Amino acid sequence: MEALHRSFLDHLAQTSPHPLALDIVHAEGCLLTDRAGKQYLDLVAGLAVNNVGHRHPAVIAAIKEQCDHYLHVIPYGEFIQEPQVRFAERLTSILPSGLDNVYFVNSGTEAIEAALKLAKRITGRTGLVACHKSYHGSTHGSLSITGNETKKYRYRPLLPDVQFMTFGALADLELITEATAAVVVEPVQGDAGVRVPDPVWLKALRERCSTTGAMLVFDEVQTGFGRTGRTFAFERSGVIPDILVLGKALGGGLPMGAFVASRERMHLLTHDPVLGHITTFGGHPLPCVAGRAALEVLLKDDLSGNAERMGSLFKELLVHRTIQEVRGEGLMLAVDLGDANRVQRVVHACLKNGVLGFWFLSCPTAFRIAPPLTISEAQTRAACEVILAAILGTEGQQ
Ligand SMILES: Cc1ncc(COP(=O)(O)O)c(C=O)c1O
């Protein structure tokens, strides 16, 4: 085994027994290049992060420019840092009026944690409602509202007062009551294997939260920034949350999370107790400038539109008797083969032939397609050819 690979296994904490261990030395657009010079068409985008493509020139230029001014200067919230202010201004300019105030943190899970705290502070309640098969992050609070028992059982006790409803089930909305502080929902479930809800359910969910006074929190960590063919997934149903949670593509390829609410509600974090949520690195100037540059590219180049078009093309081309379903919206897709072993073989065969796909946390029978939203028609067609050949090549194998 090569020395770097050995050292990777010896000195870096591992998260699974069999990491892919690709050794990438360069990334550009939708392509990854490994140390041996082999190229991969990236259908993962760093897990829904590189929405504007790897190393977009506008993002790189913004990062370089900021490096000439300052990096970290003070924990979040004390100084006026223009990159934070400008990014918050721009983000809220494309959000509905109740979502006009941004708190920047470092990751999706931290944003979820903080959103739970804000909902408790607003309502004075403790109850939390989330969905079966959801994924909201790996820290204790986020894990508590994650609907995947296999990820949780070793880490109990988790947060008390959490209930789970079935995603899309109207009857389960009864679980939301006057004791509920927050209802946390992915507007399209990601790691459940991409599940798109009926807008009727989302509207009923909104209504139930409004009647009971519970805060509706949309986790758009994965769905945000054009991934589903809209800038934000909630735009499709028109259902507006009280608190919007963002991450992944938010920082233009640099680590960042955020939660967005009304200024009045967010102001509660300033007193009783003072410093109600704090973070040293949240709102670091580099992800702020990178995220703002990426957002401008997303809007100017209508990458949501491209996601919609290329998503439809994937669905049109990926037809085979082994494919049970291609689910999803835009470029947030699950190819369901109905068989976990088959998925393993197909993903590995694709990798061998230069196409990187990936798995889901809670849906072993499907693999994900979530490329940069800049993917071209030619690249989409090429990816589908490789996937179909892989499916054909694994037919009859056990
Ligand atoms: C829907 C959703 N919420 C939250 C998270 C957690 O984000 P992070 O890994 O940045 O903590 C993820 C990560 O995959 C996610 O998909």
Image (spheres, grey):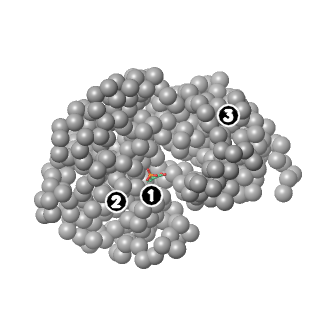
Q: Determine the secondary structure under disc 3.
A: loop
Q: Position of residue 259 (x, y in %)?
A: 30, 49
Mark 1 CB within 8 Å of ligand 1 = yes
Q: Is residue 395 left or right of residue 274?
A: right
Q: Which residue is mark 3?
A: 35
Residue 263 in view in this figure: yes
Q: Amino acid at mark 1?
A: Gly
Q: Position of residue 396 (x, y in %)?
A: 87, 51
User: Which sits in the foreground, 367 or 239?
Assistant: 367
- Tag 1 and tag 2, C-beta contact below 8 Å: yes
Query: Does 13 sit above or below residue 380?
Result: below
Residue 319 in view in this figure: no
Q: Determine the secondary structure under disc 1.
A: loop
Q: Amino acid at mark 2?
A: Glu
Crowding around mark 2 (Cα neighbors within 10 Å: few <14, some 14 to 19, many 20+) is many
Q: Amino acid at mark 3?
A: Arg
Numbered label attached to residue 137: 1
Q: Which residue is mark 2?
A: 113
